[in-house]
Amino acid sequence: MALFPETARYKYQYARALQANKNPHAKLVLQELVANYYPAAYDNLGWVNLNNKKYREGIALFKRGAELGSMEAMFSLASQFYEGIIVEKNLDSAYSLAKAAASQGHPDAQAMVLNLERQIQKEYLDAESKAMRQRRLDNIISGVLNSLLLRN
């Protein structure tokens, strides 16, 4: 960074190193990167805000980072929709965002996509099984009613 102080990638790595060491200067560097629309910085600054209980700001940063193509921001936002603690749970949004991040090679997003696909498939099979049981019950009731009507 000393050789190329204006290179955003180096600034970003510097901010991450500061963040890892819990240095408060990291936030300033991340804010500067966000002001210059560096996509990856939105995720890091989003987490800084979430960790400081500034939930609305954190989620807004994840959204903007996702819009700019940051797979990390996409995954962070997908995780929020999946967990449903800070934002309302929305598995469709979680799936879409995780799929977008997974397509960029994000390994945790790839795992989330597989998990959500299994979950969706299970819910579908459970609903299908419930509908089948209901049809059987309807047929039994209909048969009993028909036999009673025929006796009378």
Image (cartoon, helix red, strand yellow):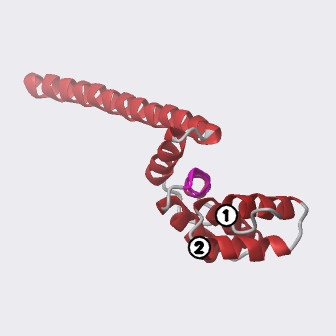
Q: Was residue 109 drawn as part of the magenta stretch in this picture?
A: no
Q: Residues within 10 Å of mark 1 (few under 14, many from 20)?
A: some
Q: Secondary structure at mark 2?
A: loop
State whether residue 122 is above or below residue 37.
above
**Which quadrant: the N terminus?**
bottom right
Q: Residue at x 38, y 32 (%)?
A: 130
Q: Which mark is residue 65?
A: none
Nearest the viewer among 80 and 145 is 80
Q: Residue at x 35, y 28 (%)?
A: 133
Q: Position of residue 74 (x, y in %)?
A: 55, 54
Nearest the viewer among 23 and 114 is 23
In the rendered image, which residue does mark 1 sit on? Answer: 8
Q: Position of residue 26 (x, y in %)?
A: 80, 70
Q: Residue at x 16, y 26 (%)?
A: 148
Q: Position of residue 82 (x, y in %)?
A: 57, 52
The rendered magenta stretch, by its main secondary structure, is classed as helix
Q: Residue at x 84, y 59 (%)?
A: 17
Confirm whether residue 6 shows in the render.
yes
Q: Are marks 2 and 1 in contact (CB under 8 Å)?
A: yes
Amino acid carrying label 1: it is: Ala
Q: Which residues are magenta?
A: 70-78
Query: Which numbered disc, 2 or 1, marks the residue that appears first in the sequence?
Result: 1
Q: Quadrant of residue 9?
A: bottom right
Distance Cα–Cα, label 2 vs label 1: 9 Å
Q: Was residue 72 drawn as part of the magenta stretch in this picture?
A: yes
Asked if residue 76 lies left or right of residue 130, the reply is: right
Nearest the viewer among 127 and 117 is 117
Confirm whether residue 52 shows in the render.
no
Asked if residue 129 lies left or right of residue 43, the reply is: left
In the rendered image, which residue does mark 2 sit on? Answer: 36
**Which quadrant: the C terminus?**
top left
Q: Position of residue 118 (x, y in %)?
A: 51, 31
